[in-house]
Image (cartoon, rainbow, N blue to C red):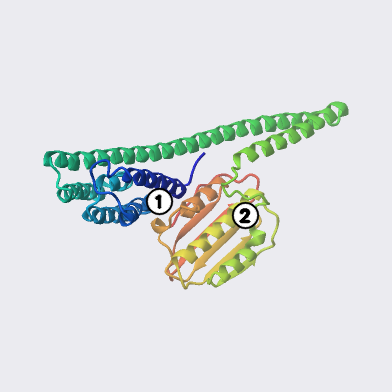
Amino acid sequence: MRIRPLVGDTLFAVALTTVAVTLGAEAARQGQRPLDAAAYALVLLVHLPLAFRSQAPVTVCGLMYGTWAVYIGAGNWPVVGSIGPMLALYTVASLRPPRVSVPCAVLLGGIWIYAGAVSHADSWASVAGQALVYPAVLWRFGVVARRSAELTRQLRREQAERARREVAEERGRIARELHDVVAHHMSVISVQTGLARFVFDTDRETARAALGTIDATGKEALEELRRMLTVLRAAGDGAPAGPMPGLARLGDMAERVRAGGVPVTLTVEGTPRPLAPGIDLCAYRVVQEALTNVMKHAPGASAEVRLTYEPHQVSVAVTDDGQGVVSDRVRSDGGHGLIGMRERAKLYGGRISTGPQDQGGFAVRLTLPTSARADAQGDHTVT
């Protein structure tokens, strides 16, 4: 059963206080001055702060040292109040660096010598040895515990990183498997489509069987895609569960940017038409990233989004009239950045240009082919 640190320290403080009070009753038998009510009160004050040793180890150590010194100065048996301060030193050494714990160890040795002087010790060699050995041993144990805790934390971080890498490798394997599944099913569908076209007029039964195979293969491929994409979409990766956004939602995006303090005008030229989902999403994300960069890096600027539908391509341009952004200042953490824009454009055979305008401000222009025969033309970046 795991116990919270405060609860565990409180129980520990109560236990050590009980031990100290019990030991105090033996003072007279050891030839020491019997403890009175004030002495017992000081014993409580020496040990009870241990309940907060994990939260404020240095403060607790200083408080206990001071109370123990007052207890010793009153002529009481020093051993009764020594348990708590020694544990306080161990706690500081286990939680704080040596530059903090070493002075605490030296101070404990000084109080030990002070106790020997107040009690008129017969053997100063014994007092000096205890003042040196006890703090040194406690400090060493605390340092070892601190290093062990640091190694444990480092090991846990490495294990977590290893687990993340294994998850990434597994997801990569699934992605490759997904590629094989899609390629296989598409090959089957392509072959059966050719067969159906070839025998459509001469052998209707064979053509019907081929169409049935295409239907079954298509359904199986979709089912495999759904199953594997469910595995690839980790619960915490922020992947959207609903439909992907597209150019039809540029108006909503513009409204959100205006609400963020950036004036945006949206102009649509040509006749809007449905686009392939990938192209639609690509154009939307590029506009989204460009407007985000305006908000981040061109405060006070206004922006214009121009969407143009042409017979065989669609183009978007995002311009602003501010200072613009510098390419190497745009970080890609938390978003795709300029590099992500180029990669998206390249994936769909498009062209993108990004750079400052002659009249001031910054411009991002993207052109994507919408015909099925579009070839990958690469990307072009204006610097």
Q: Earlier in the sequence, mark 1 or mark 2?
A: 1
Pick the residue in front: 313 or 322.
322
Name the residue: 57% across, 55% down.
Answer: 285
Above or below for 351 versus 184 = below
| Relative to 160, residue 260 above or below | below
At a point 14% along the width and 42% down the height, the residue shown is 128
Residue type at tag 1 = Ala
Q: Nearer the viewer, mark 1 or mark 2?
A: 1
Give me the residue at 84% from left, 31% from top: 200
In the structure shown, which secondary structural element does the residue marked by tag 2 occupy?
strand
Q: Secondary structure at mark 1?
A: helix
The crowding category of the residue bearing disc 1, from other C-alpha atoms within 10 Å (few below 14, some 14 to 19, many at least 20), is many
**In the rendering, at what x and y percent does residue 14 appear?**
41, 47
Residue type at numbered disc 2? Gln
Nearest the viewer among 30 and 127 is 30
Q: Position of residue 186 (x, y in %)?
A: 69, 33
Judged left or right of residue 317, residue 38 is left
Please name the residue that numbered disc 1 is placed on.
51
Residue 76, horizontal then vertical, whole percent: 25, 51
Instruction: Give residue 313's mark.
Output: 2
